[in-house]
Image (cartoon, helix red, strand yellow):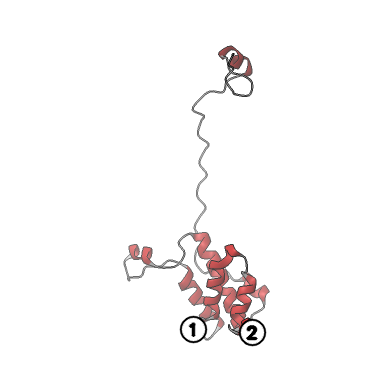
């Protein structure tokens, strides 16, 4: 038996798609899509939604979302969802173009407001005042031997 035959074809496709070292977490979530219990494309996608987004573990206890094992950051959750859905696509033979069009049904968080740049703590020194203070033009103190 050769190594390609050790895993199902769906898992091999995930391994090929997420082959880079930095993509190992996404490979795992792709394989979770391949191995999902969902019997239809829609069920598989809903499982990806459950896997990749933090939800409260205990009903009516919002704080319990912190013990959910899914990725925490919004960007990671979206990457996880796309990787998992690509696994579902491999499992059900969905074309890659259709898989790329799928978006999570979660509302995306609004971008953080951009803060104004803080004012500099020290005033800028002009080149003429540098020479008067004894510092060179390279911001290196002048020393004499």
Q: CA distance from mark 1 to mark 2?
A: 27 Å
Assess whether mark 2 and mark 1 are in contact (beta carbons under 8 angstroms): no
Q: Which residue does the numbered mark 1 point to in the structure image?
A: 37
Q: Is residue 23 positioned above or below 15 on the image?
A: above
Q: Which residue does the numbered mark 2 point to in the structure image?
A: 2
Question: What secondary structure is found at the residue carrying circle 1?
Answer: loop
Location of residue 26 in the rendering, given as x and y in whole percent from the top left corner: 55, 68
Q: Quadrant of residue 72?
A: bottom left
Question: What secondary structure is found at the residue carrying circle 2?
Answer: loop
Q: Residues within 10 Å of mark 2 (few under 14, many from 20)?
A: few
Q: Residues within 10 Å of mark 1 (few under 14, many from 20)?
A: few
Q: How many marks?
A: 2
Which image quadrant: the C terminus? top right
Which image quadrant: the N terminus? bottom right
Between 84 and 16, the residue placed more toward the observer is: 16
Location of residue 5 in the rendering, given as x and y in whole percent from the top left corner: 62, 85
Write the residue at 56% across / 81% down.
41
Location of residue 76 in the rendering, given as x and y in whole percent from the top left corner: 52, 62
Of the two numbered discs 1 and 2 on the same chain, state the one appearing first in sequence. 2
Write the residue at 57% across / 14% down.
134
Can I make out residue 93 in this image? no
Q: Is residue 42 positioned above or below 78 on the image?
A: below
Can I make out residue 41 in this image? yes
Location of residue 111 in the rendering, given as x and y in whole percent from the top left corner: 52, 52
Mark 1 or mark 2, whichever is nearer to me: 2
Write the residue at 64% across / 21% down.
137
Q: Residue furthest top?
A: 132
Between 26 and 20, the residue placed more toward the observer is: 20
Q: Is residue 14 left or right of residue 105?
A: right
Image disc number at residue 103: none
């Amino acid at each position: 038996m050769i190594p390609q035959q050790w895993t199902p074809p769906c898992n091999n496709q995930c391994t090929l798609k997420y082959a880079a070292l930095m993509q190992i977490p996404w490979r795992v979530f792709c394989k979770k899509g391949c191995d999902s219990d969902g019997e239809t494309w829609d069920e598989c996608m809903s499982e990806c939604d459950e896997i990749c987004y933090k939800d409260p573990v205990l009903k009516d206890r919002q704080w319990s979302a912190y013990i959910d094992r899914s990725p925490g950051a919004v960007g990671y959750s979206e990457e996880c969802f796309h990787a998992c859905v690509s696994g579902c696509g491999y499992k059900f033979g969905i074309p890659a173009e259709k898989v790329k069009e799928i978006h999570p049904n979660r509302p995306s968080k609004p971008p953080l407001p951009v803060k104004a740049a803080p004012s500099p703590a020290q005033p800028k020194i002009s080149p003429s005042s540098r020479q008067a203070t004894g510092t060179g033009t390279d911001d290196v103190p002048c020393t004499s031997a």
